[in-house]
Image (cartoon, rainbow, N blue to C red):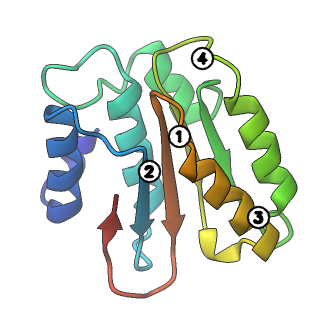
Amino acid sequence: MMDDYKNIQEIAYSLLINSIKKNKLSHAYLINANNYDKCDDFVKAFVKTIVCDCNNTSYSNCGTCNKCIRIDKGSYSEVKVIEPVSGMIKKEQLLELQEEFSNYSIEGKYRVYIINNCDRMNKHASNSLLKFLEEPTEKTYAIITIFKKYMCYISR
């Protein structure tokens, strides 16, 4: 649950929870993990908080509903994760993502795509992502992570 990060990632937690409370979620977030080894878990908790229908008054996720369980297993159709293949994220992966997200949502109100290790995109993939980010669809959220050790921040 997002509350697990309240004291560990205070600034990121506050920024994201306040965005949810005020109904002012940005369509894209860039998260620099700064080698934080639990970044994947933090991102997954944030995604579940956006998608979960069970706990919307506490601005957290229940962790036990069908959506939350399927997000943990990687089988929820409205959440897509892009990872480097053979060390790189390629244009074809992003074109496939764009094609998939051009269709209407089947199971839920919100769709989320996560691109991990965005620093491993080739030039063509970066250009495809920029085009996709410039034309966001309603109720679709992007979470882009970078794991290199730089100054930690979240951009929206």
- Label 4 to label 2: alpha-carbon separation: 18 Å
Q: Position of residue 153 (x, y in %)?
A: 31, 73
Eye-nearest disc, 3 or 1: 1
Q: Which residue is mark 1?
A: 136
Q: Earlier in the sequence, mark 3 or mark 2?
A: 2
**Counting other residues with Cα less than 10 Å from the Cα at mark 3, is it few (<14), some (14-19), or many (20 or more)?**
many
Residue 125: give its label.
Answer: 3
Identify the residue under disc 4. Answer: 105
Is the C-beta separation of discs 3 and 1 under 8 Å?
no
Estimate how packed mark 4 is, as few (under 14), some (14 to 19) or many (20 or more) residues with alpha carbons within 10 Å: some
* Quarter that holds the C terminus: bottom left
Q: Is residue 152 above or below residue 49?
A: below
Q: Three-letter amino acid code at disc 3?
A: Ala
Q: Residues within 10 Å of mark 1 (few under 14, many from 20)?
A: few
**Which of the 4 image quarters holds residue 1?**
top left
Q: Badge 2: how crowded within 10 Å, few (<14), some, or many (20+)?
A: some
Residue at 62% of width from left, 60% of height from top?
130
At label 1, the amino acid type is: Pro
Which badge, 4 or 1, is on the more N-terminal residue?
A: 4
Label 1–label 2 contact, CB within 8 A:
yes
